[in-house]
Amino acid sequence: MSIPSETRQWVLSNKPTSLPTLSGPYPTFSLTTSPLESPSQDQVLLQLLYLSNDPAQRGWISAGVDPARLYTTPVEIGSPMHARGICKILKSDANGWEEGELVLANPGWKEYAVLDADKCQKIPSLEGLDVGVTQFLGALGLTGLTAWYGIKEVVKAGPEDTVVVSGAAGATGSMVVQIAKHIIGCKRVIGIAGGAEKCRWVKEHLGADACVDYKSETFVEELKKETEGFVEVYFDNVGGEMLDLMLTRIKRHGRIAACGAVAEYNKDSAQGYGIKNWFEVVSNRIEIKGFIVWDYLGKAAETTQAMVKATKEGKIKIDAGNETVVETGFEGVPETWMKLFEGGNRGKLITKLV
């Protein structure tokens, strides 16, 4: 193909205070076209092939967010949406980076991008393990690293622990369930997911001992039954009302890994669910620890090796079943991303540009 001189990109046009809107007078994103420079020394020109969709991105575009309190630079009005992806090198002016090579990078929502080569990451070949390249955005990427770090290092789950995982059918939660049950060997692993089909998948495919459907009218009663006698560990991907309920199901001196708060991302301060059971933390000396995977990047390589080894040994499953790949024209990138907040994915949500 000829080398492009411009690129389409989705930029932030209005910072949302609730659920992002894709139409109307104040859409969250706008599709624009921008000139594209030719790569200079030590740079590469990339074509975006696959996009990672992550609930955390919602926090990067929130209205009123204080940059000093955010763990990354927020997306500014008029700037392309931040995102990680798998790209193909179209042109290289950097030694060791070949045209046609696939790389991991952070191009944002742009069809093409020019980046410094040292900001890209080569996709490793895994001898003896046949997985799709998109797994490096999920189970073998930052998602899997988040799960490993959170359950093994943050709350230090052990074989003697019963673990509850919210968002158990999601990208991170599905890996936490497998790591807790099949690598750590936790006594009991209980998932929480939305809908009977997802709960069945969490039990039958991932190996959880139980999975409770939060959409069920009897959810609270079922959760209390599954956590009778209380539990030692809770891996929280949801926040809000779910976290509040789980505070009443944690044993004395129990531990909570605060990984995400997807239930709260699309609510402003007035709409947010205020924690009502906070005294449980005091009374039962519950430890809650928030974490960001970037604090663990120094151990990414060894963690990936451990995950690959566990997959080869049949302890965990890394296959097409733990990702939802949606073929999308570039015009539909925001619509696919919004599936994160509609429960439209099982495992990692990936956009495949077509």
Image (cartoon, grey):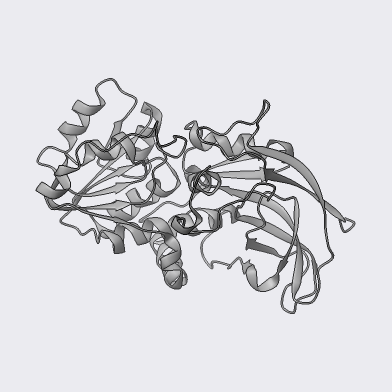
Name the quarter where the C terminus is drawn.
Answer: top right
Rendering quarter of residue 200: top left
Q: Is residue 153 above or below residue 196?
A: below
Q: In the orientation shown, which residue stands out farthest toward the right?
A: 2
| Closer to us: 132 or 25 | 25
Q: Is residue 105 above or below residue 328?
A: below
Residue 215 in the figure: left or right of residue 226: right
Q: Position of residue 239 (x, y in %)?
A: 34, 41
| Closer to us: 325 or 146 | 146
Q: Is residue 50 above or below residue 15?
A: below
Residue 64 in the figure: left or right of residue 5: left
Rendering quarter of residue 106: bottom right
Q: Is residue 119 above or below residue 317?
A: below
| Closer to us: 243 or 199 | 243
Q: In the orientation shown, which residue stands out farthest toward the top?
A: 217
Q: Position of residue 326 (x, y in %)?
A: 61, 39
Q: Is residue 144 visible?
A: yes
Q: Is residue 140 visible?
A: no
Residue 90 in the figure: left or right of residue 248: right
| Closer to us: 136 or 27 | 27
- The residue at 34%/58% (across/down) is 150
Q: Position of residue 293 (x, y in %)?
A: 43, 61
Count of marks placed on residues: 0
Name the quarter where the N terminus is drawn.
Answer: bottom right
Q: Position of residue 232 (x, y in %)?
A: 17, 50
- The residue at 36%/61% (across/down) is 149
